[in-house]
């Protein structure tokens, strides 16, 4: 019982010590001792200890029990050892139950092996093991991820045939499945026909419309929620606000934000971050700052969104100042690679050379992050804007990643600013060697020659080397 208590506590590792103490004292252990300790291994991702327990259970003869085998299945799946989980499953052909199938199917979904999850469900259907809600949820998730319309319709029919079509979890999963494959009409019909709906069902339908950019339907559903006296929560708005930001739908975004205030939804980290990101992208930086300052619990995404907002509005010093404040005041919140990327980007566009280099060094030395090509691209852009083209060229040549064009293209843009045609031609040769020539590169190199005083290198000549893509623009109509 003590081991079981520790397995669900905030200190699951203490269950290991209890287990070992009982074995050392010669106390006979039953299968439940193994199950609770394996649960602790799953929670703490203790792969080696769990593997050791597996061996002890084999020697003790407890592997005949299905519940212990299922605990082992869960442990291996949680640890990402899906092949070991499948071995355990295959060793119990006559004792598998619906929990065994559901656990392994979820394990396949966690490692993005959707097709294998569907194969396992077909095996389950051909066996005498009854299908339950949990296995159907996994089946619907895998079907949606694979984007198979006929498979989705078959899955929907199966839910009706088995008689689970009134289960709220399955209704929500069906909406999500049809949304993933782009059949928003079928998703809406399921939603409208549902006899009862909870807030999760409403959130799922709103989120599917938001992902497809059909924002007017999202707003209509929000109004309908209010009419039916269904209280929204923070998750109701997060996906919709992100879609408003990406679509630059200012009117819809403001309407949704007003509804958040009207419903007095608590500004948790996810909702607050979505509001900050939306206001910043829609050009309302003052509102973004106001929301950010009101947030009590900020995570790394919250800080990163606000830093990015400052950088996008050309306020590079404010972005660096906020980054420094994040380091000084929040020991629990550490910057991640994206945080450093937005700071470097702000420094690059703001011409803060020393601050950008210092940030890059802290990323490597203080936080032990390995820079990605995007980080190098920002540093190259920073050096290029400062006219230090040769330094930028040497930095790219020594990159551990040689196949990405981001850093080279940043240098090419700098060559145009300073009219360094010779270096620009060298960069174009590099891009050609990587088969990464883009129509925009032709414009950049032509501009480089123009600045350098070489009119014979015309834009038409360069554009003939690359096919120019058509552009488009959009406006918002309220």
Image (cartoon, helix red, strand yellow):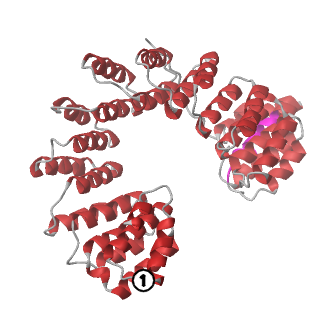
Which image quadrant is residue 22 in? bottom left
* Residue in the foreground of this view, choosing between 173 and 384: 173
Label 1 packing within 10 angstroms: few (<14), some (14-19), many (20+): few
Q: Is residue 34 left or right of residue 188?
A: right
Instruction: Identify the residue position indicated by label 1 in the image.
Output: 55
Query: Is 249 covered by the magenta stretch?
Result: no
Q: Is residue 433 above or below residue 391?
A: below
Q: Is residue 57 left or right of residue 398?
A: left
Quadrant assignment for the C terminus? top left
Which percent across, then down, holds residue 322? 73, 31
The residue at 66%/38% (across/down) is: 464
Where is the N terminus found, in terms of image quarters? bottom left
Residue 229 sits above or below residue 411 on the image? above
Residue 290: quarter of image: top right
Q: Name the outermost residue toward the bottom.
A: 59
Can you give x and y, in whole percent of width and height, for residue 153 in the image? Answer: 19, 47
In the image, what residue occupies the spot 89% across and 30% down?
453
Question: Along the line of sight, which residue is nearer the eye, 1 or 434?
Answer: 1
Residue at the image point whose x is 89% and y is 47% from the top: 391
Q: Residue at x 41, y 73 (%)?
A: 83
Relative image position of residue 136 (x, y in whole percent): 23, 53
In the rendered structure, which segment of residues is drawn in magenta? 404-416
Q: Does 410 lie within the magenta span?
A: yes
Q: Secondary structure at mark 1?
A: helix
Q: Position of residue 429 (x, y in %)?
A: 76, 50
- Please, what is the dominant secondary structure of the magenta stretch? helix
Closer to us: 236 or 443: 236
Q: Is residue 302 visible?
A: yes
């Amino acid at each position: 019982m003590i081991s079981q208590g520790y397995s669900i506590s905030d200190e699951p590792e203490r269950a290991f010590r209890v287990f070992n103490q009982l074995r050392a004292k010669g106390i006979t252990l039953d299968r439940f001792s193994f199950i609770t300790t394996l649960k602790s291994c799953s929670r703490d991702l203790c792969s080696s200890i769990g593997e050791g327990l597996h061996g002890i259970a084999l020697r003790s003869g407890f592997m005949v029990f299905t519940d212990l085998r299922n605990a082992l299945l869960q442990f291996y799946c949680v640890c990402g050892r899906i092949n070991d989980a499948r071995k355990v499953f295959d060793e119990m052909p006559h004792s598998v139950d619906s929990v065994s199938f559901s656990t392994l199917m979820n394990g396949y979904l966690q490692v993005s092996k959707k097709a294998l999850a569907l194969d396992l469900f077909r095996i389950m259907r051909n066996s005498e093991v009854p299908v339950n809600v949990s296995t159907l949820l996994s089946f619907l998730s895998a079907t949606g991820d694979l984007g198979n319309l006929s498979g989705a319709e078959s899955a929907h029919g199966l839910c009706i045939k088995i008689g689970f079509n009134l289960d709220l979890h399955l209704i929500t999963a069906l909406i999500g499945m049809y949304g993933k494959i782009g059949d928003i009409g079928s998703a809406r019909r399921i939603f409208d026909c549902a006899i009862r709906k909870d807030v999760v069902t409403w959130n799922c339908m709103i989120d599917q419309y938001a992902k497809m950019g059909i924002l007017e339907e999202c707003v209509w559903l929000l109004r309908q929620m209010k009419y039916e006296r269904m209280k929204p929560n923070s998750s109701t708005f997060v996906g919709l606000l992100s879609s408003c930001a990406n679509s630059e739908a200012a009117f819809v975004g403001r309407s949704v934000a007003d509804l958040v205030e009207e419903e007095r939804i608590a500004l948790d980290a996810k909702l607050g971050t979505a509001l900050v990101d939306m206001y910043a992208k829609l050009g309302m930086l003052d509102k973004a700052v106001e929301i950010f300052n009101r947030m009590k619990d900020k995570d790394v995404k919250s800080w990163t969104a606000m830093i990015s907002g400052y950088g996008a509005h050309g306020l590079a010093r404010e972005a660096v100042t906020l980054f420094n404040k994040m380091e000084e005041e929040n020991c629990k919140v550490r910057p991640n690679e994206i945080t450093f990327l937005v700071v470097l980007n702000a420094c690059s566009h703001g011409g803060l050379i020393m601050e950008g280099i210092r940030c890059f060094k802290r990323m490597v030395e203080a936080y032990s992050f390995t820079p990605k090509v995007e980080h190098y691209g920002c540093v190259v852009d920073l050096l290029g804007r400062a006219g230090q083209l040769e330094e930028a060229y040497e930095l790219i040549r020594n990159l551990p990643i040689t196949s990405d064009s981001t850093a080279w293209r940043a240098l090419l843009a700098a060559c145009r600013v300073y009219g360094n045609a010779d270096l620009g031609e060298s960069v174009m040769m590099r891009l050609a060697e990587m088969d990464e020539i883009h129509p925009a590169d032709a414009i950049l190199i032509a501009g480089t020659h123009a600045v350098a005083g070489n009119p014979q290198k015309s834009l038409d000549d360069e554009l003939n080397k690359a096919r120019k893509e058509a552009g488009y623009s959009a406006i918002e109509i309220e």
